[in-house]
Amino acid sequence: MSNTRTYNVITYGCQMNVHDSERISGLLEEAGLSRVEATPESPLGGGADVVVFNTCAVRENADNRLYGNLGHMARVKAEHPGMQIAVGGCMAQKDRDVILSKAPWVDVVFGTHNVGSLPVLLERARVEEEAQVEIVEALQNFPSNLPSRRESPYSAWVSVSVGCNNTCTFCIVPALRGKETDRRPGDILAEIEVLVAQGVQEITLLGQNVNAYGVEFGDRQAFAKLLRACGRVEGLERVRFTSPHPKDFTDDVIAAMAETHNVMPQLHMPLQSGSDSILKSMRRSYRSERYLGIIERVRKAMPHAAITTDIIVGFPGETEEDFERTMEVVAASRFAAAFTFQYSKRPGTPAAEMPDQVPKEITQARYERLIQLVNEISWEENRKLQGTEVEVMFALGEGRKDTETNRMSGRARDNRLVHVSVGDDLAERPRPGDVALATVTHAAPHHLNSDLPIRGLRRTRGGDAWEAATAPAAAPAGVGLGMPAFGRPAGT
């Protein structure tokens, strides 16, 4: 039986947290731990020796979810001698003095700026038999500079900046992740080239305000230059980025998107509200006319671009007229999808103290009307693709019903989800990371279906990387000692 300690990372929140969790996994594996997966019998932590909660503080229910799960883990830990529990991320940064008072069985609390300290803090807590709390106020190391255990051998996040210089009244992120800090372009491109050499063919550039990249070193065109530089990386097939801010979205970025072959015709552009008065109250430094102008210029440069957005309903002071302005902008923008949220009061934000908080029942009714409109539009837009052929990069985890429906799922170049019927012959089935052309036979509001045979299946280096990562570990030469081997994905 192996003496290797095991770990599991439970992630809440945004793409930045997902990226951080890959780094947390990499750090723990570098320290000699092996990952275990959650099971139906043990959905939180999978019975691991170390369970890390990487938390989010943006939504109100994040607090309840974390503390409810920590309450459950108290019972698990009591039955698992030597188990350690760590809490990191935005909630840890915010509630540094609260977590141990509510959950004294937690061993480590670490913040958003010192992810790299986790292995040392866990060992210190074990040796000293005392909880360790370490929250620092300034970034110690870019997440991308830490070791990683990537979830995908063929797709990766690359952080271009951390922190945010905006002061949106509903958002607590700048207080938790600090002012924007930019990586040097050479460091970003060097990381991308290493990833591509390992089989990665899709990169998502990541930042709290990704298109403000360059503000720290005074180059307003730095993000457009970075996109164009990505186009010169041989073997890099798809480039995406998230999330931009309308105030920083300039025409040079639109031109770079349209003119760079591997930058995808897809844009996630948060709207938040279509009402100019609400945008002002939110301290969003653009108005609906500017927003719609960006959408128009993007579509002129890339007629088939899929544009998605974020919208908050029920922000303090929102009137029925304000909400109608949002509905009008949504109708004019023709979003492929929208991530819609009911306003959530977050302590420590200016909006939490604003007068005229909108009653829950009014917010709920508006939310349902917005969802209906968004779904109608996205369905209409998806139906326009019926009968057309789309390039699909297949992926794991995109289709929950793939096994029972004999499908494989992936993303079109515009990031639309496509469920593709595949045959029974394993030699002709795509692997995750492989690419093929699929004809859209049916459209739904949130996905496309293809029930015709795929065409032009291309076995990619990303598919090779997935196959290598999932192949059973080779038996060691010579006399075996009966010790299990632990495989690691390529490039970790």
Image (cartoon, grey):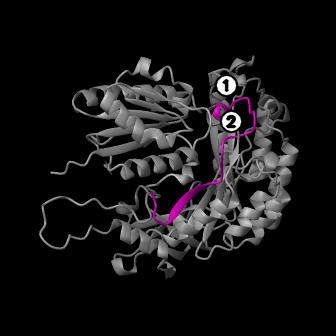
Look at the numbered disc 1 and give the secondary structure of its residue.
Answer: helix
Residue 480 drawn in magenta:
no
Q: Residue at x 76, y 64 (%)?
A: 225
Compared with 414, 55 (above or below) is above
Amino acid at pointer 1: Ile
Badge 2 vs badge 1, beta-carbon distance below 8 Å:
no
Q: Residue at x 41, y 31 (%)?
A: 108
Look at the numbered disc 2 and give the secondary structure of its residue.
Answer: strand
Bounds of the magenta segment: 151-175
Mark pair 2, 1: CA separation: 13 Å
Q: Nearer the viewer, residue 173 or 296?
A: 173
Residue 152 drawn in magenta:
yes
**Which picture quadrant has residue 441?**
bottom right
On-image quarter of the C terminus: bottom left
Q: Nearer the viewer, residue 181 or 150?
A: 181
**How far across and how far down the image is residue 92, in percent?**
51, 30
The residue singled out by tag 1 in the image is 362
**How far across and how far down the image is residue 100, in percent?**
42, 21
The residue singled out by tag 2 in the image is 312
Q: Earlier in the sequence, mark 2 or mark 1?
A: 2
- Asked if residue 262 can be seen in this view, the reply is yes
Amino acid at pointer 2: Ile
**How far across and how far down the image is residue 132, in percent?**
42, 28
Compared with 419, 41 (above or below) is above
Disc 1 crowd rating (10 Å Cα; few below 14, some 14-19, many 20+) is few
**How far across and how far down the image is residue 456, in percent?**
52, 83
Query: Could you tell me what secondary structure mostly forms the magenta stretch?
Result: loop
Q: Nearer the viewer, residue 339 or 92?
A: 92
**Which picture quadrant has residue 466?**
bottom left
Compared with 470, 58 (above or below) is above
- Asked if residue 382 can be seen in this view, the reply is no
